[in-house]
Structure formats: structure tokens, C-alpha cells
């Protein structure tokens, strides 16, 4: 369901909109530019992957060229680069263009940040990692993430962790009717028990999942593993997924199991800034291996993203994520809010006219849609 989404320049910098930029003057200058993928951003330094999946594949560092000063380059962006692109020590290339984005996950300006920001570009799936207990799930937070994803034209995967501690059924029932895919993971001890009484801290950076794609008890003698890891991997393969989740939900545990050495692989950024990765708040793209260790997609971890401001969200975009309701709402009065109690809202007529056997399903759809609409406002 990836739809074309407007460029960031549509929102706060119309003057520099790409259509009015003197492209023809830049083109000849940069016709030797190479293409790269932004895998990390840290204080004006961009980590890029060039010649992806070829023998020449390499990681380089770059900065933005002067003409891009006012444009934000984010993780997941495809960019054009000039200068020294060898990636050798001490080299710094220049990003001269941002390629057209297929999606932009964004958050609204708020009290702490006056700008609406793009968080990640070109992702097609948002993975909301939520623990079933410790910490307790917060459905309002999940709703808000779903809204942000649907607004961006992204699919949603709800990953419910710690199923060894609580039942996933209530959350499943809440989210499956709105087109959210659900995967449920649990911690399983190597002796087969699903008891989470100890082992805390062993998993965060753990030795679990040392063997890409297997992570089974015959390769790890100690403690525990996350299951079913392969079901999660199957949902991520061939896609670019953004992972969000509150502290303590088990996101790092999951990323480590899926992408062995994930955090060591981002060391390039650390070498430059001297900062540990865990103090970084910007997104990092990690390559997901398939069961044989071959590249099979991208997982973008977002350590700093705990919630989304949603004031920018367009009701129409949200409605588009509900195909059936979108058609019905064509009969709504102009400017209908579609909220509960909205005068003459066609969604209410649709419910009333429902055949008996469809009533429950229709009601679940409309109620879920209205819940998401309401979640746009207020704070988490
Ligand atoms: N019982 C149980 N504990 C789990 C499970 N997954 C992770 N944990 C534990 O939950 C705690 C938090 O996991 P992390 O992976 O560090 O959580 P996080 O979401 O990355 O949190 P931050 O690192 O603070 O962002 C750790 O002690 C893990 O061992 C699970 O499925 N069941
Ligand atoms: Zn309506």
C-alpha cells in the first residue's frame, strides 16, 4: 500500500521546492555522482552504503553539499554523492541530491522541537514493538503509531513481545480488524520452559542469535532465546521496516537476535564522533540477513523515537488505509469529521444498513477507525 507521499519541501520550504530549483545548472556539475543509501546520521555526518550487494560495496562518510543546507537528509534516503567515495580513512564525500522518496515517516512539531520532521525515508513498514507486560502495553501509543504509519502509506506490523508473561489475545483482537499484522514473541529457556524469572541483561547485547536464522538451543548453551524468530523475520524479509518501541519492551533483544552484531555494525558512526551508539538518538539502518546470511531487507532502529506528534496527519490519508470505509465516506457531508456523533456521517448509515452477519465486523472497523481518528489529538 505504499502511496506517493509529498516531499518535505511541500511542508515548510516551498521556495526551495525541487520544481523551482535550478536543476539544470546542477546537473552537468554532478553528472558523475554516485548513488548511495543513508544508513546513519550523526551530527551532520552521514554514513552511506555504496554499490549495495556488489563486490564493490562499501561504507563511506559524507556531509551535505552547500545546496542542500536547507534540506533534511534522513536514514533510508537514497542520495547522489560526489567527491571521494572510496570510503578510505579520513575521506568525506558530499551529498548533492536526495532522490525522490517513496514514503516519509514524520512527526509534528511540538513544544520541544518547532519543526515538523521527517524521521525516516523510503520505509514501507512500521514495526511497533510492544511488551504484553513489563512494561504494560499502552494502546493509545500503539494507536498513534498506527496513525503515523497509515498517514505515511506504510503497513503496520505489531510485534507483541514477552508472551511468556501475558496473553496476546486482547491486543490481537483490537488490532487485527484494522489491517495490522500481529506477530507474538516470547522468551524460551533452553530447557524449553517459558519462564522469565531471570536472565535479565543477558539478552540486551546478548549472545543470542549468534547463528543467523537459527538461534536454536543447539548453538547457544546458555539462558534463553526469542521465539518464533523466523516468523518475525518472514514479515521483515524483502522490506524496509522501521522499528519503534518504548524502553524495556525488548526491541534491542529482538534486533540483536535478527541482526547478529547489529550494534557493532554501526561502528562507523561511533569512530567519527567517539560516541557510543547507545547514546545516539538518530535512526540506524541495519541489514537484515535471511536464514542463509544473505541480505534480505533493512531494519531501521529508532532509539530516540518514542512517540509521534500527529497534528500534521491528514484525515483523508488515514481514511485511505481503510479501503471499505473510504468508499462509504464518499457520501459524507462536506467537511465531515467522521467522528462519533458527526451529523449525517455516512459511516453511521453504513452500520445501520448492515446485514446481520456483517454487523460485528463493520462495527469493529468503524470503531477502530474512529479510535484512531481520536488518537490524533492530545498527547500520549
Ligand atoms: N520475559 C521476557 N523478557 C524479555 C523478552 N524480550 C526481552 N526481555 C527482557 O526485557 C528487558 C528489556 O529488553 P531490551 O531488549 O533491553 O529492551 P529495549 O526495548 O531495547 O529497551 P531499551 O534498550 O531501553 O531501549 C531485558 O531484560 C530483556 O532480557 C521476552 O520475550 N520475555
Ligand atoms: Zn463521515
Image: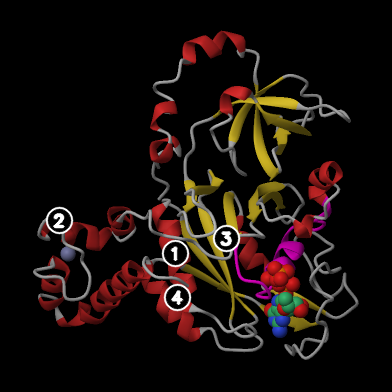
User: What label sits on residue 235 in the rendered view?
Assistant: 3
Q: Is tag 1's residue or tag 3's residue first in the polypeptide sequence?
A: 1
Where in the figure is residue 269, as x and y percent of width and height? 79, 44
> Is the residue 369 above or below the residue 95 in the image?
below
Q: Which residues are magenta?
A: 244-264
Near-viewer residue (96 or 132)? 96
- Neighbours of disc 1 within 10 Å: few (<14), some (14-19), many (20+): many
Q: Which residue is mark 1?
A: 146
Question: Which residue is disc 2 drawn over?
Answer: 330
User: Along the horizontal axis of the image, is 355 left or right of 191?
Assistant: left
Q: Secondary structure at mark 1?
A: helix
Q: Is residue 105 magenta?
A: no
- Crowding near the residue tagged with mark 2, few <14, some 14–19, many ≥20 C-alpha atoms within 10 Å: few
Q: Nearer the viewer, mark 3 or mark 2?
A: 2
Q: Disc 1 vs disc 3: which is toward the camera?
A: 1
Residue 140 is tagged as 4
Residue 87: percent from the left, percent from the top?
82, 29
Q: Earlier in the sequence, mark 2 or mark 4?
A: 4
- Mark 4 neighbour class, 10 Å CA radius: few under 14, some 14 to 19, many 20 or more: some
Amino acid at each position: 500500500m505504499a502511496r506517493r507521499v509529498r516531499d518535505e519541501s511541500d511542508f515548510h520550504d516551498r521556495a526551495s521546492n525541487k520544481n523551482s530549483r535550478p536543476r539544470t545548472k546542477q546537473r552537468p556539475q554532478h553528472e558523475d555522482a554516485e548513488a548511495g543509501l543513508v544508513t546513519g546520521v550523526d551530527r551532520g555526518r552521514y554514513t552511506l552504503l555504496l554499490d549495495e550487494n556488489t563486490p564493490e560495496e562499501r561504507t563511506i562518510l559524507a556531509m551535505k553539499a552547500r545546496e542542500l543546507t536547507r534540506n533534511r537528509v534522513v536514514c533510508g534516503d537514497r542520495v547522489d554523492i560526489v567527491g571521494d567515495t572510496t570510503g578510505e580513512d579520513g575521506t568525506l564525500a558530499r551529498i548533492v541530491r536526495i532522490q525522490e522518496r517513496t514514503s516519509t515517516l514524520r512527526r509534528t512539531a511540538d513544544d520541544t522541537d518547532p519543526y515538523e520532521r521527517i524521521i525516516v525515508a523510503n520505509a514501507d513498514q512500521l514495526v511497533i514493538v510492544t511488551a504484553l507486560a513489563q512494561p504494560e502495553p499502552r494502546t493509545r501509543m500503539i494507536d498513534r503509531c498506527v496513525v503515523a504509519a497509515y498517514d505515511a502509506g506504510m503497513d503496520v506490523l505489531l510485534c507483541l513481545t514477552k508472551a511468556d508473561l501475558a496473553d496476546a489475545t486482547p491486543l490481537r483482537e483490537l488490532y487485527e480488524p484494522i489491517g495490522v499484522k500481529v506477530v507474538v514473541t516470547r522468551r524460551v529457556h533452553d530447557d524449553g520452559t517459558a519462564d522469565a524469572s531471570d536472565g535479565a541483561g543477558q539478552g540486551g547485547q546478548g549472545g543470542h542469535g549468534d547463528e543467523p536464522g537459527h538461534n536454536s538451543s543447539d548453538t547457544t548453551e546458555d539462558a534463553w532465546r526469542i521465539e518464533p524468530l523466523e516468523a518475525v523475520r518472514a514479515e521483515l524479509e524483502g522490506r524496509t521496516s522501521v522499528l519503534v518501541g518504548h524502553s524495556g519492551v525488548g526491541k534491542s533483544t529482538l534486533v540483536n537476535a535478527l541482526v547478529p552484531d547489529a550494534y557493532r555494525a554501526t561502528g562507523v558512526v561511533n569512530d567519527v564522533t567517539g560516541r557510543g551508539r547507545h547514546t545516539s538518538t538518530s535512526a540506524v539502518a541495519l541489514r537484515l540477513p535471511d536464514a542463509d546470511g544473505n541480505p534480505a531487507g533493512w531494519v531501521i532502529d529508532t532509539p530516540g523515537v518514542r512517540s509521534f506528534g500527529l497534528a500534521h496527519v491528514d484525515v483523508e490519508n488515514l481514511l485511505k488505509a481503510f479501503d471499505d470505509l473510504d468508499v462509504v465516506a464518499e457520501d459524507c457531508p462536506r467537511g465531515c469529521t467522521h467522528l462519533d456523533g458527526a451529523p449525517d456521517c455516512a459511516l453511521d448509515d453504513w452500520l445501520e444498513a448492515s446485514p446481520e452477519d456483517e454487523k460485528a465486523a463493520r462495527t469493529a472497523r468503524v470503531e477502530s477507525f474512529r479510535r484512531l481518528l481520536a488518537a490524533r489529538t492530545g498527547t500520549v
